[in-house]
Image (spheres, grey):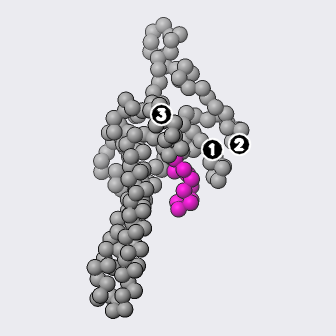
Amino acid sequence: MLALLTVQPDNNSTTGNYFSIENTYNYRFCYKCQGIKPPRTHHCSICNECTMKMDHHCPWVGNCVGLRNHKFFWQFLLYAMLGLLHEGISLKINESRLSPAGNIGLWGLMGIAFGCTIGFMWIFHTILLCKNWSSLEMAELGKNDIFAHQSVSESWKQAFGENRIYWFLPIRSPPV
């Protein structure tokens, strides 16, 4: 299981088998939820709850994108991009057959344009997932990347799971 935060050995332990997060992270308190915030947790004012590894609140899916559903948001962007590009290219190629007046070609161009726009968002979130970042943390981690030691493979598996069969399927990966 990959950790969200690297845990350092406690300096006060005599055996070295105990680990403590207190030396590496100061806990924060969420005054809106009235609870302690775990590391990398942010409060969403729209959902009115704290989300671990929160990326953003997405009105398209109606909730916050974070630790438990970043994989599904990434898949949503991938499949939306592929669907729009397929629709746009198909309409543009078959424009003369489908509509002699030429109105279908405009819809094809719009599909391609929206597909490319969503494609840029998909590329952006792929980069974030490969670095184990969220868009809220991007500015801070760009200056001091605490995940630089983590490989792309480890970062990817944290969001998508160990089994490659489940990476492109919209289902949760089974626990390891």
Quadrant that contains the N terminus = top left
- Give the amino acid at mark 3: Lys
- Tell me the tag on residue 143: 3
- The magenta stretch spans which residues? 55-67
Whether residues under marks 2 and 1 lie with C-beta atoms below 8 angstroms apart, the answer is yes
Residue 100 lies, in percent from the top left, at 33, 92
Residue 99 lies, in percent from the top left, at 35, 89
**Where is 1 relative to 119, above or below?**
above
CA–CA distance between discs 2 and 1? 8 Å
Of circles 3 and 1, the one toward us is 3
CA–CA distance between discs 2 and 3? 29 Å
CA–CA distance between discs 3 and 1? 23 Å
Q: Residue at x 37, y 70 (%)?
A: 112
Q: Can you identify the residue that label 1 sits on?
A: 43
First along the sequence among labels 2 and 1: 2
Are there few (<14), some (14-19), or many (20+) residues within 10 Å of tag 1? some
- Give the amino acid at mark 1: His
Q: Can you identify the residue that label 2 sits on?
A: 32
**Where is 93 relative to 113, above or below?**
below
Quadrant that contains the C terminus = top left
Q: Is residue 81 left or right of residue 32?
A: left
Q: Residue at x 34, y 55 (%)?
A: 168
Q: Nearer the viewer, residue 169 or 90?
A: 90
Of circles 2 and 3, the one toward us is 3
- Give the amino acid at mark 2: Lys
- SS at mark 1 in the image: strand
- The answer to whether residue 5 shows anywhere in this view is yes
Whether residues under marks 2 and 3 lie with C-beta atoms below 8 angstroms apart, the answer is no
